[in-house]
Amino acid sequence: MPELPEVETIKNVIGPQIRGLVIEKVTVNRPEVTVRPAADEFCRRLTGQAVSGMTRRGKFLIIRLHSSDRVILHLRMTGGLLLTPADYPREKHTHIIFGLDNGRELRFTDPRRFGRFWLLGKGETDTYSGVEKLGTEPFGAELTASYLSSRFGKRKVAVKQCLLEQSAVAGIGNIYSDEILFSAGIYPARPAMSLNAGEWERLAAAIPERLSYFIEANKITPEEYLQTGGREYRNTPFLQVYGQDGRPCPKCGEALCRMVVGGRGSVYCPACQKR
């Protein structure tokens, strides 16, 4: 699943390219992808609207329109966005096409069809997508050791599971929770209530630092993004532990280990992240 760094990359690549453009036509090939409103109404309401920009909230993308309407998108497991010339070959699992007034198309592709769209009107409260339930952004001033400790410090659940709770910190998934905990030197299965003040400080520092690092590492030009179908940035070679079990730890050389925490595969260093 695309996590915060990948979603931020999509925003940074596509957002500037569609700003100011008018949506001339919307084609929905899979009606179940548009949760609200239904596909026909979704197309009708968006036709003729101008894009003012694109933002991110957690793992959600938000296309903002000059009318103050907004399109909210969650990519889920395999969703992606491509901005292409109109005659560019369409990928097999293209479910929504936004025809733009500069002759290009914004296409949503999703092999597993789990991604979803919501269109909300000006001033309309979002009680549909889940964006309103998200916790603090990882880069906000609110994310402190005290905040993390107050949210998780009395919990018996593993600290890795806590990092995955979108209602506490938005945007962290399985990949970057491993990277964050490795950077902070914390064993993923540690009960959150067992962390001391110094460990909460390290964790609070590691969250924005690691996510910022991977956003920077994932940088890609619009041309490269299009040529790779928007997929190359998802396979960053800069991961230190995720998916690297059995390989030497980049810090100490000990073999990295894999275990399951809360039903999710987790990789850690037994020497750097002691139980």
Image (spheres, rainbow, N blue to C red):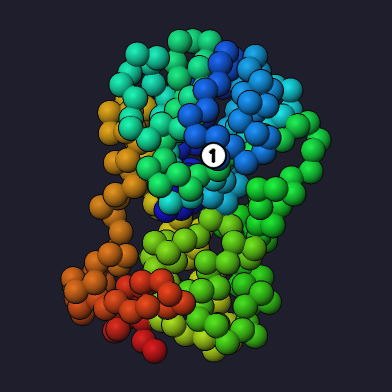
Q: Nearer the viewer, residue 12 or 119?
A: 119
Three-letter residue code for mark 1:
Val
Residue 185 at x, y percent in the picture:
40, 77
Q: Nearer the viewer, residue 36 or 212?
A: 36
Q: Residue at x 55, y 35 (%)?
A: 31
Label 1, secondary structure: give it: helix
Q: Residue at x 53, y 55 (%)?
A: 171
Residue 127 at x, y percent in the picture:
74, 49
> In the displayed structure, does residue 73 sit left or right of residue 106?
right
Q: Is residue 199 visible?
A: no
Q: Quadrant of residue 126?
A: top right
> In the displayed structure, does residue 6 sit left or right of residue 120?
left
Residue 154 at x, y percent in the picture:
65, 85
Q: Quadrant of residue 105?
A: top left
User: In the picture shown, does residue 17 fall above or below 76?
Assistant: above
Q: Nearer the viewer, residue 240 or 105?
A: 105
Residue 92 at x, y percent in the picture:
33, 32
Q: Quadrant of residue 50?
A: top right
Query: Seen from this angle, which residue lies furthest top?
Result: 102
Q: Which quadrant is the C terminus positioned in?
A: bottom left
Task: State the residue position of label 1.
Answer: 33
